[in-house]
Amino acid sequence: MKRTLLNITLMVLLCQGILFLQNGKIVKRKSYDIFKFPEVVKKIAKKEDGKLILFPEFEYLNHVAIEKISYLSDGLKVTGFLAYPKGAGKYPCVIYNRGGNREFGAINPLKVAFVLARVAAWGYVVVSSQYRGNDGGEGKEAFGGKDVNDVLNLIPLLENLSNTDTPRIGMYGWSRGGMMTYLSIIRTDRIKAAVVGGGVSDLFMMKDHRPEMETYVYRELMPDYDKNKKALLDARSAVKHADKICKTTPILIMHGTADWRVVPQQAIALASELLKEKVPFRLVLFEGGDHGLSEHRVEVNELIKMWLDRYVKNRGKLPDLTPHGK
């Protein structure tokens, strides 16, 4: 009997080990032609003499390759996207974390063109997950639970690509993707810099400002929510765990003061905790900015590129956080 139990235990451990080794393995990749989507084309180009001519600000799309992928995460096939420069060589990397939940906020052709491809055109290999259970992927997302593994397992995915320089990895998340970013840099020190826009950092505050989030998101996605409400929300709230955030990952936090989806007080509260814990960060509040900072898009893109180039691409020195100067 003991030997049988031992054999079962060894088999379980072996299977877990095999799954761990397979994390990040790409099981399917296919070219993704954004020019096939009318909603993208009408925003980026015009037709002249039957030919499609890109507007100057979108010419970067000619220099980027895009793929839709399926990769393994905890034994599940999860859907995602890759975007990278067409030129040969090894490039620094960026993991992009989408917002929303389920199909709301999922990466669509517009986000591929305007976010993933844009960052790739700056000279990065960009990878992003739809999170488990979405866009045809297996499993069910948990809004900051085990689905955080779908983000972390993009690190070994990048390591298995031939055009990546994986000592240089950045992370960029918006809204719920900000929460996923914070939770990721609590668990790994591999991220050289992080960028968060309109990020969720306090799920208690979110619930108080938007009660519908508890009804339609927390309760539907978090396992046994009503039995373990406080523990589940606490575990997902970066403001409660600022002391665990990696101190070698400088964070650019951007938030609009007119954001009703994720109130700016979340960013301010987290910044206060990061200051106490001496985590390097920069907080930029955009006057009158909405959740997507749509009124400040040019400035936002400039800031994102500056932050990633400084700390990821160019491996910039971390700031001195000790009091100093005259």
Image (spheres, rainbow, N blue to C red):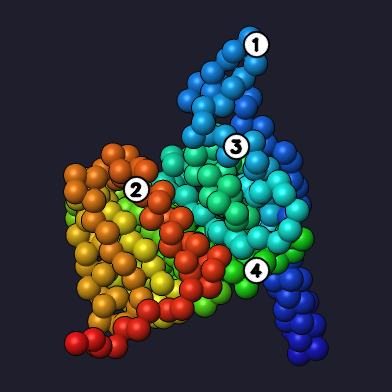
The answer to whether residue 326 is left or right of residue 234 is left
Q: Nearer the viewer, residue 215 or 87?
A: 87
Q: CA distance from mark 3 to mark 1?
A: 19 Å
Label 1: state its secondary structure: loop
Q: CA distance from mark 4 to mark 1?
A: 42 Å
**Which residue is drawn at the image coordinates 19% and 60% (left, top)?**
265
Question: Which residue sits furthest front?
Answer: 326
**Which residue is drawn at the image coordinates 35% and 83% (left, top)?**
320
Mark 4 Cα-neighbour bin, 10 Å: few <14, some 14–19, many ≥20: many
Residue identifier under label 3: 61
- Which mark sits nearer the N-terminus, 3 or 2? 3
Q: Nearer the viewer, residue 245 or 295?
A: 295
Q: Give the mark toward the camera: 2 or 4.
A: 2
Residue identifier under label 2: 299
Position of residue 303 relative to residue 41, above or below, is below
Question: What's the residue type where badge 4 is placed?
Answer: Thr
- Whether residue 312 is visible here, answered yes or no, is yes
Q: CA distance from mark 1 to mark 2?
A: 35 Å
Measured from the top left, where is residue 117 in percent x and y? 57, 43
Q: Give me the disc on residue 50.
A: 1
The answer to whether residue 233 is left or right of residue 132 is left
- Which mark sits nearer the N-terminus, 1 or 2? 1
Question: What's the residue type where badge 3 is placed?
Answer: Leu
Label 3: state its secondary structure: helix
Residue identifier under label 4: 166
Asked if labels 4 and 2 touch by Cβ distance under 8 angstroms, the answer is no
Position of residue 112 relative to residue 53, above or below, is below
- Which mark sits nearer the N-terminus, 3 or 1? 1
Asked if labels 1 and 3 touch by Cβ distance under 8 angstroms, the answer is no
